[in-house]
Amino acid sequence: MINITSSSNAKYKYFKALDRKKTRYENGEYTVEGIKSVNDAIKSGKEISALITADDFCGTKYDILTYCMPRTLFDKLSDTKTPQGIMAVIKMDADTKSVDITKPYVYCDGVSDPGNLGTIIRTADASGMGGVILSPGCTDVYAPKTVRASMGSFFNIDIITGKDANALREYKAMGFDLIAGVLSDTAVDFKEADYSKPIIIVVGNEANGVSEAVKKLCTPTKIPIYGNAESLNVSVAAALYMYEWSRHRK
């Protein structure tokens, strides 16, 4: 165990800087916080560079390089209201994942809120999807809030990043059927969509919906709105689509 006693320590400054996207991608590392997330990362076999603990942390001790610091310093690294006192620094996965025609996917087209993205990842895992595909305009999948909102599913399911409309066009040529949730009078009810083929469910940006370039590749579908709400939250809409696919599969 290595003790850190000052915020001027070089390692401490690096850990603090990992809350910035630029630092994460320059170094290929990100952090997860909390006992459950750390345990999930270890169980999934992720490459953990280091653990960071508060000096009053009373949980499990691991055979991993650990930096220990006063609670006051640890809390400044945390972005949670009640930090548990443990954090892991994890190597990013190699960007080599590809789609499998035998599995269903959900495609996030510009989802910008980390909480929404994390919830979509969690629901994709729960509903049995093969993975989550992200457009270049999505929020950072390695942001602490995204990882935390996924509740461990971040480590269970394939996440494929940086795929634009051209990639979707290639997936369609492979045999995937693309269905998108859109606000349109001509869109069919989402329950009437064909879920029997290899499928990619497309959901769009919270404010602007699915982009025109992506929409052109998809069968337009919609979730009925019976009240006065303008639309559904994107993570809720994605959940309805994913579980509708699951219902049809059964």
Image (tube, rainbow, N blue to C red):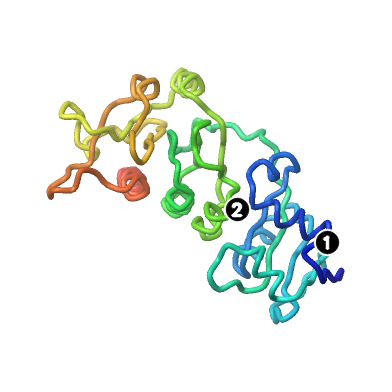
Is residue 249 shown above or below 7?
above
Q: Residue furthest front?
A: 8
Across and down, in percent, residue 66 comes to 81, 67
Above or below for 29 versus 11: above
**Quarter assignment of residue 242:** top left
Give the number of the disc on residue 105.
none
Direction from residue 4 to residue 99 in the image, left or right: left
Residue 43: name its quadrant.
bottom right
Question: Is the residue marked by circle 2 packed among few (<14), some (14-19), or many (20+) residues within 10 Å?
Answer: many
Alpha-carbon neighbours of circle 1 within 10 Å: few (<14), some, or many (≥20)? few
Q: Residue 193 appears at what percent x and percent y?
A: 26, 33
Q: Which mark is residue 155?
A: 2
**Residue drawn at x 82%, y 69% as measured from the top left:** 4
Q: Is residue 104 left or right of residue 227?
A: right
Of 207 and 142, nearer the camera is 207
Tell me the element at label 2.
helix
Residue matched to label 1: 9
The residue at 13%/48% (across/down) is 228
Percent x, y for residue 117?
46, 47
The picture places residue 42, in percent across and down from the top left corner, at 70, 61
Q: Secondary structure at mark 1?
A: loop
Q: Nearer the viewer, residue 128 or 186?
A: 186
